[in-house]
């Protein structure tokens, strides 16, 4: 890799990882030499781009595009221009599609070009005084371009303006500001690019007496009741992911319908429309959660009947925003976009007020194939697995059996809440799952399953983050072996509280959300699953505290199943055999092998290896249970719609149903 491409990757990630400049698949960067141009391919995320994310084009072919004849029909013209760009690729077999702004990048004589949709810059560019203030703040050496439909026409306008600029200053501009769009910065080094951007930011901020800072605001418990209902209402063809949020930017515009309509009802730029659509719902209701849902349902139906699609953004008066999309990653982009355009609206007040796109400009973007393609690539298109978009809580998921189960479910497309007391390991594990780059997400939440308030908070925060709860897996548990002579009451009660009461609390708070979901989507099935044990099927010598809690757990499962099946909530227990390779058994200091050796539970055993061999010999399958074995049972339980109240053994034949 040559050093210039390394610099291009570094500067791309520098701005791509900063939401103040780039959100989702927006923005683009390029490097050129005399013969070739490297530009970020359409839909590729700048934040994690590598050498394979750049489309390489032949500059001789790019230079010829302005000389070609194209149709006067806008749709045909943009298709012809797209094909001309595609034919300029050095390696057509790469499958990469060059950015629609490739020809703009090729115009500049400088080596590097970085184009972003900076929030601060768009506070000026989306204002009524954009052109006037640009001249006042930056002088004549910054090129301002009035809004034009993006694509070939915009390219021709900018090409003409750059030529005029060059005649006047004997060089190309290094800063181009485009109304209702963003900023282009060009230079021969990436350090110079960064310096120019920093200067632009400093000058813009200096125009404010007090620069408004953002503050994330919490949403009320009422939204945790509204959100699961709205998610189900919008999940007609495919299960959706949703989130609820609020911020100081947003709060200013949702006090009433007038403030909403005057402030943020109309879009400012193409990115906003590509991801959020051009129209948003505003629910003018401060009633109960049920009343808000009823009003939202009416507005959703009206929107769908009028536009033929479902809304993605719903503002709730004085409560916050609901964003709904086809994946967790998509929803996170929507959240960023909403905060961005609300911030832009507030910033425009410093420059004469907001200047949204006209209805005609909106119509062009809505029908532009290029932007629809970019969105499709950046959000991903194909289904992920059998659990796609299901929200799953796994307690005790920071390590061991729980982590193994969570990882397998994540691979099948589930959005996983890693719930655990161990915050350090839980966050680390969630980060590892998210680093896989899939459309689903993992999220760590702390929980003590022995405390009602903690479990209630876990469920509420899960709902606000992912939109609902489809599967609750009560996996967290503790085990301290010992005989009647050795077991203290305090230890017995702790194990019972965690292993038995903890399951009750998980079921109690999960079913409240699931009942709401059932009310608005009656054909949707949900699951509460306890990870029990073979010790819940058969007594365990000198392990009565653990076995007793697990026996009781099966009693809870059967009882919960009878109560909840009318709401399509299935309740089942999975009873695994021993997971010999996990920390519960193999921890060198406090694992069960150590405990059982010290407690003398295995006659004649002198080493940990003796204890392990003893237990493996008891399994007809000849090995311990694994997370994959358990996950397969979980998949069965979730997939079927008829069985509930069951204790499913996964013991390698060690325990058989009678």
Image: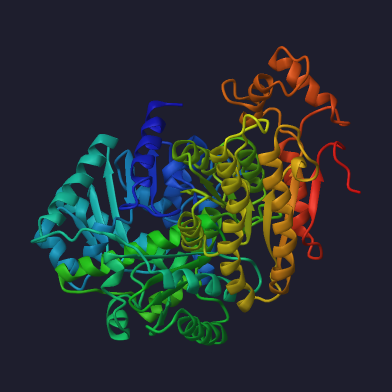
Q: How did the renderer colour the structure? A: rainbow
Q: Is residue 647 above or below residue 591?
A: below
Image coordinates for residue 256, horizontal then vertical, percent: 30, 83
User: x, y percentage for residue 371?
Assistant: 48, 63
Q: Could you tell me residue 455's position as x and y percent?
A: 50, 56
In the rendered view, would you say 254 is above or below 425? below
Q: Is residue 329 visible in this depiction of the protein?
A: yes
Residue at 28%, 45% in the rendered image: 186
Total number of numbered discs in the rendering? 0
Is residue 648 found left or right of 90 in the rendered image? right
In the image, 28: left or right of 502? Answer: left
Position of residue 8 measured from the top left corner of the image (x, y, whole percent): 38, 36
| Image quadrant in which you'd find residue 598 | top right
Q: Residue at x 49, y 56 (%)?
A: 458
The residue shown at (78%, 18%) is: 603
311, 472: nearer the viewer:
472
Most extreme residue toward the front is 485
- Residue closer to the observer: 513 or 26: 513
Residue 634 visible somewhere in the drawing: no
Instruction: Kindly indicate the quadrant of the structure image that contains residue 611.
Output: top right
Q: Residue furthest right?
A: 658
Q: Relative to residue 221, is residue 475 depicted above or below?
A: above
In the image shown, does 531 or 283 lie closer to the viewer? 531
Q: Residue furthest top?
A: 606
Which is more toward the observer, 266 or 395? 395
Q: Residue sitting at 39 percent across and 81 percent down?
A: 359
């Amino acid at each position: 890799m040559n050093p210039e491409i390394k610099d291009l990757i570094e500067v791309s990630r520098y701005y791509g990882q900063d939401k103040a400049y780039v959100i989702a698949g927006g923005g683009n960067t390029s490097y050129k030499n005399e013969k070739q141009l490297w530009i970020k391919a359409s839909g590729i995320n700048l934040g994690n781009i590598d050498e394979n994310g750049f489309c390489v084009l032949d500059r001789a072919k790019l230079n010829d595009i302005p000389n070609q004849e194209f149709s006067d029909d806008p749709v045909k013209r943009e298709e012809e221009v797209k094909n001309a760009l595609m034919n300029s690729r050095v390696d057509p077999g790469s499958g990469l599609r060059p950015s629609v702004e490739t020809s703009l990048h090729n115009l500049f004589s400088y080596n590097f070009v970085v184009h972003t949709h900076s929030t601060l810059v768009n506070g000026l560019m989306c204002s009524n005084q954009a052109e006037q203030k640009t001249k006042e703040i930056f002088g004549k050496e910054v090129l301002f371009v009035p809004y034009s439909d993006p694509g070939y026409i915009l390219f021709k306008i900018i090409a003409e303006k750059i030529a005029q600029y060059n005649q006047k200053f004997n060089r190309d501009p290094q800063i181009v500001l485009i109304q209702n769009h963003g900023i282009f910065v060009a230079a021969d080094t990436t350090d110079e690019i960064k310096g120019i951007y920093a200067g632009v930011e400093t000058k813009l901020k200096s125009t404010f007496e007090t620069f408004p800072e953002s503050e994330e605001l919490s949403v009320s418990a009422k939204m945790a009741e509204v959100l699961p209902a709205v998610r189900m209402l919008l999940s007609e063809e495919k299960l959706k992911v949703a989130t609820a949020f609020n911020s100081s930017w947003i709060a200013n515009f949702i006090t009433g319908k007038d403030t909403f309509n005057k402030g943020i009802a109309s879009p400012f730029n193409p990115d906003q429309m590509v991801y959020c659509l051009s129209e948003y719902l505003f629910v003018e209701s401060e009633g109960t959660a049920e009343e808000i849902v009823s009003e939202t349902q009416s507005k959703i139906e009206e929107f769908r009947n009028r536009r033929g699609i479902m809304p993605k953004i719903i503002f709730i008066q004085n409560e916050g925003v609901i964003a709904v999309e086809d994946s967790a990653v998509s929803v996170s982009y929507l959240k960023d976009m909403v905060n961005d355009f609300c911030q832009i609206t507030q910033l425009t007040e410093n420059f004469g007020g907001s200047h949204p796109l006209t209805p005609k400009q909106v119509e062009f973007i809505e029908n532009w194939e290029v932007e629809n393609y970019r969105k499709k690539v950046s959000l991903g298109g194909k289904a992920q697995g059998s659990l796609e978009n299901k929200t799953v809580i796994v307690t005790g998921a920071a390590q061991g059996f729980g982590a193994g189960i969570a990882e397998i479910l994540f691979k099948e497309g589930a959005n996983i809440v890693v719930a655990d007391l161990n915050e350090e390991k839980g966050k680390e594990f969630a980060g590892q799952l998210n680093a896989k780059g899939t459309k689903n997400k993992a999220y760590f939440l702390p929980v003590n399953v022995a405390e009602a308030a903690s479990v209630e908070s876990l469920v509420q925060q899960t709902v606000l983050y992912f939109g609902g709860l489809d599967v609750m897996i009560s996996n967290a548990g503790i085990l301290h072996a010992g005989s009647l002579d050795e077991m203290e009451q305090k230890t017995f009660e702790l194990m019972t509280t965690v292993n038995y009461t903890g399951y009750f609390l998980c079921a109690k708070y999960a079913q409240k959300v699931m009942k709401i979901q059932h009310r608005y989507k009656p054909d949707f099935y949900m699951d509460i699953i306890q990870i029990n044990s073979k010790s819940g099927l058969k007594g365990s010598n000198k392990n009565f505290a653990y076995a007793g809690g697990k026996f009781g757990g099966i009693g809870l499962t059967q009882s919960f199943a009878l109560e909840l099946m009318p709401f399509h909530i299935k309740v089942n227990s999975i009873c695994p055999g021993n997971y010999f390779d996990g920390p519960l058994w193999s921890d060198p200091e406090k694992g069960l092998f150590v405990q059982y050796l010290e407690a003398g539970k295995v006659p004649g055993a002198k080493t940990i290896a003796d204890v392990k061999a003893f237990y493996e010999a008891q399994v007809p399958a000849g090995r311990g249970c694994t997370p994959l074995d358990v996950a397969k049972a979980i998949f069965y339980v979730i997939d079927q719609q008829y069985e509930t109240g069951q204790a499913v053994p996964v013991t390698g034949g060690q325990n058989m149903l009678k």
